[in-house]
C-alpha cells in the first residue's frame, strides 16, 4: 500500500539512539503485521498499579502502533485483544476490558475515519456484552467502505474455535450439496476463517517475553516470522515496531525451500 513520505518522516522524526526509520527498507514492509499485546498486567503490577491501569496504558501503545502502521503503508494490522480463554479472568477485569474496548473504539473512530482505516473483528463478537457489541457493529458499519489499512481486532478470538467453526460451516455446505468433498482445499478452509480475504501475517510480534502462541491465528501463522520482545505491551511503541520490522527484514524466509541467495 502507498504511504506519504512527508507524513512518514514527520511521524518518525525524533528517534532513539539505536534505531531510526532509515534502518528499514520501505519497499519491503510486511503487508500484514500482527501483535499479541501481552504484559499489561505485569506492567501495572511492576509500578504498584492495578491491572486495569495496565490495560489503559496498553490502549495508548496500540494507538501509536496503529498510526505507525498507517504511516508506513501497512495493508493489515491485526491485534490480539481478548482470547476465548480470557473469560477465565476475574469478572471485574473482564468487565473493564469490555468497557475499554467500546470506549476506545468510540474515541478513536474519528481518527480511524480520517485515516481511511477499515475496522474488522476476528472472533465471535456476538457473545460480547450488548454495549460492546453495538459499538463494534457501529465501527464496522462506519468504516466498511474505507480503502486504507485494515485494522483487525481479535476479540473473543481463539484459533481452535475459529478452525472448529470453519469445519462446521464446510461440513454444512457439503451436506447441503453446495460443495463436494473434493473441493475442500487450503484456500477453501482459509475462506471460512475469520480472516477470510486477508493475507496471512508475515510478522507476528509478541510482547512481554512469553514464548507461546496462546491460541492465536493457528492456521494463518504457518510461515509467519516471530519477533518476541521482553518489553511489556504498554511500553511498546512505534520504535518497537521499527525494531521488529528491521529484524524481520534480516530473516531468510525459506518456506521449506532453499535460500534465494
Ligand atoms: C494482555 O495483557 C491483555 C489481555 C490479555 C487482555 P495481560 O493482561 O495478559 O498482562 P499480563 O500477561 O498478565 O502481564
Ligand atoms: C494472550 O495473552 C491473549 C491476548 C494478548 C489477548 P494471555 O495473557 O491471555 O496469554 P497466556 O495466558 O499468557 O498464555
Ligand atoms: Mg498475559
Image: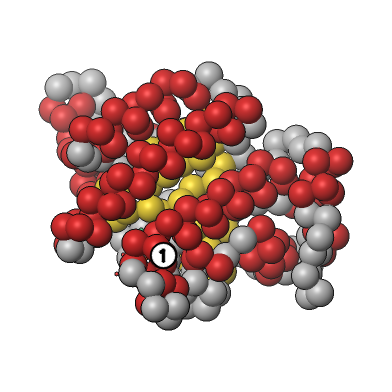
| Other-residue count near label 1 (Cα within 10 Å), few / some / many at <14 / 14–19 / ≥20 | many
Position of residue 50 relative to residue 122, above or below, is below
Residue pushed farthest front? 48
Position of residue 113 relative to residue 159, above or below, is above
Answer left or right for 24 relative to 221. Answer: right
Looking at the picture, tell me which residue is in the foreground, 118 or 254. 118
Which residue does the image show at 49% across and 66% down from the upper left?
233
Which residue does the image show at 20% across and 63% down from the upper left?
89
Residue placed under numbered mark 1 in the picture: 54
Position of residue 12 relative to residue 212, above or below, is above
Could one spot residue 60 in this view of the protein?
A: yes
Position of residue 1 relative to residue 21, above or below, is above
In this picture the colour scheme is secondary structure
Looking at the picture, tell me which residue is in the foreground, 183 or 234. 234
Decide if ligand 1 comes within 8 Å of the CB at mark 1.
yes
Quarter of the image where one finds residue 139: top left
- Measuring from the top left, give residue 192's x and y in whole percent: 32, 36
- Measuring from the top left, give residue 55's x and y in whole percent: 40, 59
Looking at the picture, tell me which residue is in the foreground, 28 or 45. 45
- Measuring from the top left, give residue 203's x and y in whole percent: 57, 58
Amino acid at each position: 500500500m502507498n504511504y506519504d513520505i512527508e507524513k512518514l518522516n514527520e511521524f518518525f522524526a525524533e528517534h532513539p539512539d539505536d534505531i531510526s526509520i532509515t534502518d528499514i527498507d520501505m519497499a519491503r514492509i510486511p503487508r500484514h503485521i500482527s501483535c499479541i499485546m501481552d504484559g499489561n498486567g505485569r506492567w501495572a503490577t511492576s509500578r504498584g498499579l492495578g491491572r486495569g491501569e495496565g490495560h489503559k496504558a496498553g490502549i495508548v501503545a496500540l494507538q501509536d502502533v496503529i498510526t505507525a502502521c498507517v504511516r508506513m503503508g501497512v495493508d493489515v494490522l491485526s491485534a490480539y485483544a481478548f482470547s476465548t480463554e480470557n473469560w477465565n479472568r476475574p469478572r471485574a477485569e473482564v468487565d473493564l476490558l469490555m468497557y475499554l474496548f467500546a470506549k476506545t473504539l468510540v474515541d478513536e473512530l474519528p481518527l480511524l475515519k480520517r485515516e481511511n482505516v477499515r475496522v474488522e473483528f476476528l472472533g465471535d463478537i456476538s457473545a460480547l456484552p450488548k454495549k460492546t457489541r453495538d459499538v463494534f457493529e457501529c465501527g464496522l458499519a462506519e468504516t466498511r467502505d474505507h480503502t486504507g489499512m485494515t485494522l483487525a481486532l481479535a476479540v473473543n478470538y481463539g484459533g481452535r474455535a475459529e478452525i472448529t467453526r470453519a469445519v462446521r460451516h464446510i461440513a454444512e455446505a457439503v451436506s447441503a450439496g453446495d460443495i463436494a468433498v473434493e473441493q475442500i482445499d487450503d484456500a477453501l478452509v482459509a475462506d471460512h476463517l475469520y480472516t477470510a480475504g486477508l493475507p496471512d501475517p508475515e510478522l507476528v510480534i509478541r510482547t512481554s517475553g512469553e514464548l507461546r502462541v496462546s491460541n492465536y491465528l493457528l492456521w494463518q501463522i504457518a510461515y509467519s516470522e516471530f519477533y518476541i520482545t521482553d518489553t511489556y505491551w504498554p511500553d511498546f511503541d512505534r520504535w518497537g515496531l521499527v525494531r521488529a520490522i528491521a529484524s524481520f527484514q534480516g530473516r531468510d524466509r525459506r518456506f521449506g525451500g532453499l535460500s534465494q541467495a
